[in-house]
Image: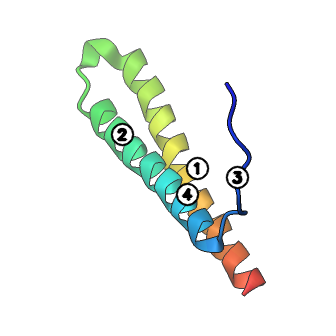
Amino acid sequence: MFLPDPTKPPTPTEYAVIAWVIAGALIVFGIVALVFAFRAPPDKHEIAIGLEHYGLWSLGLGIGIIGIYWLVRRITD
């Protein structure tokens, strides 16, 4: 797939939008996965455990991205 070179480098605001969208999506997916994992029927226990694991990792990554973004903004400003 060919992508043309950008005409200008991304601004800090564009990086902020990317960070917030990715972090927000991970947090939303994590919450949804945890809700489905806790509401799973007992006969699907193994799937619920995997979904809970996925949800916790998604939440952790989303919060981690927000933390790293905050730290980078704090250091560079």
Task: Check disc 3 and give the amino acid type.
Answer: Pro
In the image, what residue occupies the spot 69% across and 83% down?
74
Mark in front: 1 vs 2: 1
Whole-angstrom CA distance, mark 3 to mark 4, is: 16 Å
Classify the position of the C terminus by image quarter: bottom right
Task: Check disc 2 and give the amino acid type.
Answer: Leu
Does residue 44 appear left or right of residue 26 in this picture?
A: left
Per the rendering, the mark at residue 6 is: 3
Does residue 14 appear left or right of residue 10 in this picture?
A: left
Task: Check disc 4 and give the amino acid type.
Answer: Ile
Per the rendering, the mark at residue 61 is: 1
Q: Secondary structure at mark 3?
A: loop
Between 3 and 50, the one nearer to me in the picture? 3
Q: Earlier in the sequence, mark 1 or mark 2?
A: 2
Between 45 and 18, the one nearer to me in the picture? 18
In the image, what residue occupies the spot 64% across and 68% down?
69
Whole-angstrom CA distance, mark 3 to mark 2, is: 39 Å
Check disc 2 and report the residue beneath it: 34
Per the rendering, the mark at residue 18 is: 4
Q: Secondary structure at mark 2?
A: helix
Mark in front: 3 vs 2: 3
